[in-house]
């Protein structure tokens, strides 16, 4: 069966190519990928995780794919017509080799099979590329992209009118950083930018640590909320039920109590850049250990500031007895240091829980 794509001719230093739109079902039917192997093909191996993320994203009522799929086309399978404004092709052949966009196409394909998703896609069609040219286009696209700072991405969630785990976490980060009664007052690098000497923790890192206590898949939760579906509880996420019940202010209050207690008990370490408590290693370790502290507080029926102060005072005594210093020399930067401090915190809490409290 003959199909047509309306196109616009574009001329750039590499040569002439065409931009058009195509229905996703048509592209899926007529496209293929050549993975890199045996010195042939240019594509990396497909990431199933990435494909599944895109399949899930297609459930979002606001799903959008504005970036074009780059295709290499053999002119023997296509005809340019109407003064090069129309490409005509037979849809019973695999004629579009995907140069960039394989994960998007595969994710959309899975979504179409799962629940009939379809949409129009922007495509760039490049005719009769050599293998060298295909490799050049692919490498140029994938090596020159500037990575967007996570802090900016999280900050933009403030513009959303719908609830989501990331929007709640951004809201809490903003409050924590802007009010002088909160322990992280003027300590976060909002949008990833340092404004003063106390900015030792990025907004992105703060949100990352917090969202992991609320959601295992923030994008999926956001899509479920948009579609009016209920979120499923998860006992392993201590703050999830509060989020589900829209009690963001209680989440904020608990975190304020938790970190205020840390800042009071470890005042010297909290207010000096020579220690790690307000840096990524210390913060993420405290967040990774939070579940244990939260559950202990729930057992005692207390999550107030005074309760956390009493707990951390005992932990401080244990740390002093064991000569544990909260420095990068003891807890190295990165995941290893975070895990090590998390274990020390949890071990100390376990020791406290076994004694009379």
Image (spheres, rainbow, N blue to C red):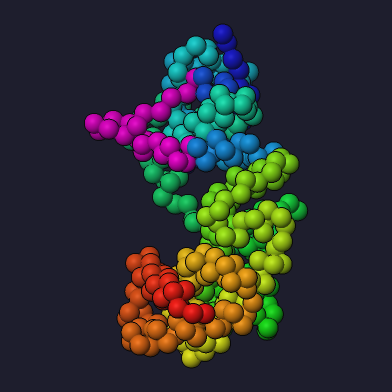
Q: Position of residue 96 (x, y in %)?
A: 47, 24
Q: Residue at x 46, y 19 (%)?
A: 95
- Depicted 218 relative to depicted 179: above or below: above
Q: Position of residue 288 (x, y in %)?
A: 47, 65
Q: Residue 297 or 13: which is nearer the viewer? A: 297
Q: Residue 250 or 226: which is nearer the viewer? A: 250
Q: Residue at x 49, y 31 (%)?
A: 106
Residue furthest toward the bottom? 268
Which picture quadrant has residue 14? top left
Residue 1 visible to the viewer: yes
Q: Residue 319 or 170: which is nearer the viewer? A: 319
Is-magenta flag for residue 36?
yes
Q: Residue at x 62, y 80 (%)?
A: 305
- Relative side of 256 to 280, left or right: right
Q: Is the N terminus in the top left, top right, bottom left or bottom right quadrant? A: top right
Which picture quadrant has residue 191? bottom right
- Depicted 154 relative to depicted 88: above or below: below
Residue 150 visible to the viewer: no
Residue furthest toward the front? 356
- Relative side of 254 to 357, left or right: right
Boundaries of the magenta span: 30-51
Is-magenta flag for residue 238?
no
Residue furthest toward the left? 38
- Depicted 219 relative to depicted 47: above or below: below
Chief secondary structure of the magenta portion: loop
Q: Position of residue 170 (x, y in %)?
A: 64, 64
């Amino acid at each position: 069966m003959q199909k047509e794509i309306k196109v616009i001719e574009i001329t750039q230093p590499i040569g002439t190519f065409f931009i058009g739109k195509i229905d996703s079902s048509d592209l899926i039917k007529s496209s293929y990928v050549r993975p890199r192997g045996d010195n042939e093909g240019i594509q990396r191996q497909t990431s199933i995780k990435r494909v599944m993320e895109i399949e899930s994203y297609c459930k979002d009522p606001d799903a959008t794919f504005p970036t074009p799929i780059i295709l290499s086309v053999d002119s023997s399978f296509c005809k340019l017509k109407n003064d090069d404004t129309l490409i005509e092709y037979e849809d019973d052949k695999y004629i579009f080799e995907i140069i960039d966009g394989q994960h998007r196409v595969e994710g959309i394909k899975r979504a179409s099979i799962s629940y009939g998703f379809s949409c129009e896609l922007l495509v760039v069609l490049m005719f009769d590329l050599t293998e060298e040219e295909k490799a050049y286009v692919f490498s140029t696209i994938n090596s020159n992209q500037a990575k967007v700072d996570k802090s900016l991405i999280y900050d933009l969630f403030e513009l959303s009118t719908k609830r989501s785990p990331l929007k709640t976490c951004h809201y809490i980060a903003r409050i924590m950083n802007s009010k002088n009664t909160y322990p992280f007052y003027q300590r976060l690098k909002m949008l990833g930018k340092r404004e003063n000497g106390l900015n030792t923790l990025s907004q992105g890192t703060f949100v990352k640590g917090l969202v992991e206590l609320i959601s295992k898949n923030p994008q999926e939760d956001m899509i479920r909320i948009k579609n009016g579906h209920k979120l499923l509880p998860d006992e392993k996420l201590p703050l999830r039920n509060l989020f589900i019940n829209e009690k963001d202010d209680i989440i904020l209050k608990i975190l304020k109590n938790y970190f205020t207690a840390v800042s009071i008990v470890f005042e010297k370490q909290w207010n000096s850049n020579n220690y790690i408590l307000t840096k990524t290693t210390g913060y993420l370790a405290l967040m990774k250990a939070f579940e244990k502290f939260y559950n202990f507080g729930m057992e005692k029926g207390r999550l107030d500031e005074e309760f956390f102060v009493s707990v951390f005072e005992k932990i401080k005594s244990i740390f002093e007895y064991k000569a544990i210093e909260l420095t990068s020399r003891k807890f190295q930067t990165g995941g290893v240091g975070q895990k090590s401090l998390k274990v020390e915190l949890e071990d100390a809490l376990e020791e406290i829980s076994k004694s009379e409290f």
